[in-house]
Image (cartoon, rainbow, N blue to C red):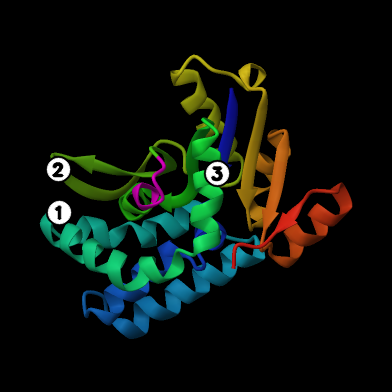
Amino acid sequence: MKLALFDLDNTLLAGDSDYEWGQFLVDCGVLERAAYEAQNREYYEQYAAGTLDIHEFLGFALRPLAEHAPADLARWHAEFMRRRVAPMIGDKARALVRRHLQAGELCAVVTATNSFVTAPIARAFGIAHLIATEPESVDGRYTGRVAGTPCFREGKVRRVEAWLARMDLHWDDLARSTFYSDSHNDLPLLERVSDPVAVDPDEALAAAAKRRGWPVVSLR
């Protein structure tokens, strides 16, 4: 069996769904612009710099899920998909995913962005499996807290391994394993698979890929 894993933000998507979701809520008047927009941008810059405290960020990012009713969140997300996500999905990204799916490979999106935001996006690519940060839910309402291990840096490796274990699989059972990512934050998982691929990489990942002889591709 072959495994194909795809990072989402700035890899399959020509943009960051987590950041754009926050900006979308600001533009809709759901969140107060001055305070939220500045903090959202600051966390995005910390992520790019590799200095992000994931638990601090998730306390910020998951708060809107806890503050609003599920029906409102669902309605906003449907509009978010049309207005913000659809323009970020390019033909090259769709073709890449389709190639792996048609080859019969086991495919999954692996993303630090929470599953509320990303599950519909994974479905838009036709990918059945999503490994994402899970927002805690109690009695049908989000709490604003994280359930389990955030799917970030080394957490991505742990979450992928737990997902494989639920299917009675291990790395040794795979003929090949590929992971596509743009970010140096994903080096732990890139180093774990047999075939790491840098996609429109940030500066740090581009340098690491060059040193290690990893392929570099563009989906833009």
| Residue 121, position as x, y percentages in the image | 37, 54
| Residue 202, position as x, y percentages in the image | 69, 65
Kind of element beneath mark 3: helix
- Which image quadrant for residue 206? bottom right
The alpha-carbon separation of the residues under discs 2 and 3 comes to: 37 Å
- Residue underneath mark 1: 70
Q: Name the image quarter holding the C terminus.
A: bottom right
| Nearest to N terminus: mark 3 or mark 1 | 1
The reply, left or right, for residue 68 in relation to residue 44 is: left
Amino acid of disc 2: Gly
| Residue 9, position as x, y percentages in the image | 51, 59
Q: Which residues are magenta?
A: 122-127
The reply, left or right, for residue 208 in relation to residue 26 is: right
> How many neighbours does mark 3 have within 10 angstroms: few (below 14), some (14-19), or many (20 or more)?
few
Q: Residue at x 41, y 50 (%)?
A: 125
Label 1–label 2 contact, CB within 8 A: yes
Q: Name the image quarter holding the N terminus.
A: top right
Q: Residue at x 72, y 38 (%)?
A: 195
Looking at the image, residue 44 lies above or below residue 67: below
Amino acid of disc 1: Pro
| Nearest to N terminus: mark 1 or mark 2 | 1
Label 2–label 3 contact, CB within 8 A: no
- Residue underneath mark 2: 140
The reply, left or right, for residue 34 in relation to residue 19 is: left
The furthest residue to the bottom: 34
Label 3–label 1 contact, CB within 8 A: no
> How many neighbours does mark 1 have within 10 angstroms: few (below 14), some (14-19), or many (20 or more)?
some
Q: Which mark is residue 99?
A: 3
Kind of element beneath mark 2: loop
